[in-house]
Image: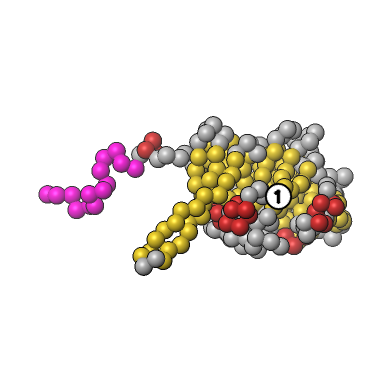
């Protein structure tokens, strides 16, 4: 009797070794898991401590990050992602490095800062994942605009202008990319990724083309350019397919729900 299944399901096909890229879920060391079963929506959460601050991420579809700040501990964040706080948690403003450059670029020159003791929680109003990334002294991470949630006070927050007309107009990241570093002490950065977030570690010289809305973060060592391909639909009609090309070495994070930002704010 012949196998009724499709003839493309042959032994050996679909093996992970046959895939060109080895993607994995983003992993960040130092977190403990408690609550429900992995992948369920029954109270599973992950926790970690940074100094005298405790971070807890929970929720499956539109997750929140809750932060308990000990006395003197601080985190900064974009004000519109504040979800709730305890009444005694103090809220203020924090000036950003390069205020004049930011003002000339039409970017915000202040962000919001919370200081302990007390609890506070953040969430972006959309489905996705909260991605925690520990940044060690000397490391530099580049992040897509408007996807930063919060960071500990020892993480420096800067930006740089995207180079190249093609990158700006069709690269899908906007005019600027956020830059996070740890000048002296390690710290914790939390991002929001739309959909699911996958990570790839590119070898030196290894490349990948990513739909412009898929880029979330990369190591500073990963280079980004924009490529285009003309696709003809006949009768002298067609369209251009634009992709972001990333070249290793380093980590690259993508989000599975495409988000296309305006080219200017």
| Residue 210 position within the rendered picture, expressed as x and y whole percent measured from the top left | 51, 49
Residue lying at 78% horizontally and 43% vertically, measured from the top left: 156
Residue 201 appears in view: no
Residue lying at 34% horizontally and 43% vertically, measured from the top left: 14
| Residue 15 position within the rendered picture, expressed as x and y whole percent measured from the top left | 35, 39
Residue 198 part of the magenta-drawn span: no
Asked where in the image residue 262 lies, by quadrant, the reply is: bottom right
Residue lying at 26% horizontally and 48% vertically, measured from the top left: 8
Is the C terminus in the top left, top right, bottom left or bottom right quadrant? bottom right
Left or right: 241, with 113 as reference point: left
Determine crowd level at label 1: few under 14, some 14-19, many 20+ residues with C-alpha closer than 10 A: few
Farthest-out residue, front? 236
Asked where in the image residue 139 lies, by quadrant, the reply is: top right
Q: Which residue is mark 1?
A: 161
Residue 72 vertical position relative to residue 169 in the rendered view, above or below = above
Q: How is the image coloured?
A: secondary structure
Left or right: 214, with 158 as reference point: left
Left or right: 16, with 199 as reference point: left
Main secondary-structure element of the magenta-colored stretch: loop
Residue 11 part of the magenta-drawn span: yes
Residue 169 vertical position relative to residue 74 in the rendered view, above or below = below
Left or right: 238, with 213 as reference point: left
Residue 34 vertical position relative to residue 212 in the rendered view, above or below = above
Between 19 and 121, the one nearer to me in the picture: 19
**Magenta-drawn segment:** 1-14
| Residue 178 position within the rendered picture, expressed as x and y whole percent measured from the top left | 70, 49
Between 54 and 23, the one nearer to me in the picture: 23
Residue 126 appears in view: yes
């Amino acid at each position: 009797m012949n196998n009724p299944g499709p003839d493309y399901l042959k032994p050996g096909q679909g093996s992970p070794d046959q895939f060109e890229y080895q993607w994995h879920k983003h992993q960040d060391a130092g977190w403990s898991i408690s609550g429900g079963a992995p992948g369920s929506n029954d109270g599973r959460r992950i926790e970690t401590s940074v100094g005298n601050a405790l971070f807890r991420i929970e929720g499956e579809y539109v997750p929140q990050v809750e932060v308990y700040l000990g006395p003197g501990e601080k985190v900064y964040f974009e004000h519109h992602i504040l979800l709730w706080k305890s009444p005694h948690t103090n809220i203020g403003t924090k000036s950003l490095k390069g205020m004049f450059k930011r003002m000339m670029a039409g970017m915000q020159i202040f962000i919001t800062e919370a200081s302990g003791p007390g609890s506070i929680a953040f969430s972006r109003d959309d489905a996705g994942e909260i991605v925690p990334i520990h940044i060690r002294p000397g490391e530099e991470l580049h992040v897509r605009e408007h996807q930063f949630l919060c960071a500990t006070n020892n993480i420096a927050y800067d930006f740089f202008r995207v180079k190249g007309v093609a990158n700006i107009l069709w690269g899908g990241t906007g005019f600027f990319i956020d830059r996070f570093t740890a000048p002296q002490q390690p710290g914790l950065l939390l991002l929001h990724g739309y959909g699911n977030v996958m990570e790839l570690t590119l070898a030196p010289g290894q490349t990948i083309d990513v739909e412009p809305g898929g880029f979330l973060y990369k190591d500073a060592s990963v280079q980004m350019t924009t490529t285009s391909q003309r696709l003809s639909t006949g009768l002298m009609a067609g369209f251009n397919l634009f992709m972001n090309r990333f070249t290793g070495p380093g980590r690259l994070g993508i989000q599975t729900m495409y988000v296309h930002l305006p080219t200017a704010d």
